[in-house]
Amino acid sequence: MAGPPAQDSKMVLTGPQRQAFRELAAITPGIDVDVYHQYGKDPLEPVIGLGRADARIGFFGRDPGRDEVQHGEPFIGAGGQHVRRALYRRLHGKPLPDFEASRAVGRDFYWANTVPYKPVGNKAWSTKVKQRFHPPMRGLLVGHWRGDRIITLGREAFLWFGIGQPKAERERLEAFWESEDRFEASVAVTLATDDGRSRDFRIYPLPLNATWYARFPGLLDARLAQLDVRPDNLRIG
């Protein structure tokens, strides 16, 4: 099984990677171009935070929102701030002081979404659109990030890992999502790229909806403890 290249600096998209996303975005209706234009942003430019190639843990969500478009950074809006507050508290033992600290605390983690573009009305992208962007997103996870522990936020993000998989594998993931202990247990998945590379990952799902809102901070704190998140254990050795 081919592994990603060894690199320890902040990840950025290569020219071909960036172009691949832009070409797919150009044929994808439903991108919220009004919000992009409101902030002077290019609606074809993907909002992908990536992070460090040697980040031990990644977060995987559904898609960017208004704040993410404005700042060009994923998980920076209201939902992402819940995550970043928990990370700051876990790493520094005190409350998150301000917005800039929330940005800084995320630099030692990997961040990505099923589709790196804001949809109109913040409605979930269709399966067709997620399938369209699946190959380049798989390529980033498999080929450029060295970590293998992923906290997914919400059902859409978790079931993304079943796209393109054999029926039995999709059914296995769907059954896991229906299990009562899904937010305490974890599940192994394998992702493969179109050029034959593959890697194994461990997925730790969490909810992200109104039903679970009150319990989310506690569930996230438990996940961070489960993954042994601490200042001296953030990177792959």
Image (spheres, grey):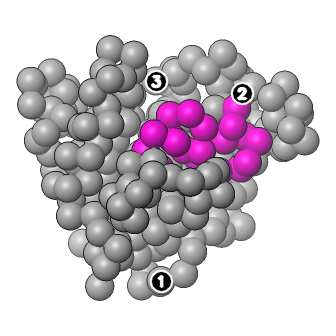
Of marks 1 and 2, which one's residue comes earlier in the chain?
1
User: Which mark identifies residue 8?
Assistant: 1
Q: Residues within 10 Å of mark 1 (few under 14, many from 20)?
A: some
Secondary structure, mark 2, is loop
Secondary structure, mark 3, is helix
Identify the residue shown where x is 60% and y is 38%. 77
Taking the image as shown, residue 12 lies to the left or right of residue 93, namely: right
Query: Cα distance, mark 1 to mark 2?
Result: 33 Å
Quadrant of the rendering where the C terminus is positioned: bottom left
- What residue sits right under mark 3 in the picture? 127
Q: Residues within 10 Å of mark 3 (few under 14, many from 20)?
A: few
> Amino acid type of disc 2?
Ile
Which range of residues does the magenta coloring cover?
Answer: 66-84
Q: Are marks 1 and 2 in contact (CB under 8 Å)?
A: no
Q: Position of residue 208 (x, y in %)?
A: 38, 27
- What residue sits right under mark 2 in the picture? 31
Q: Position of residue 147 (x, y in %)?
A: 33, 68
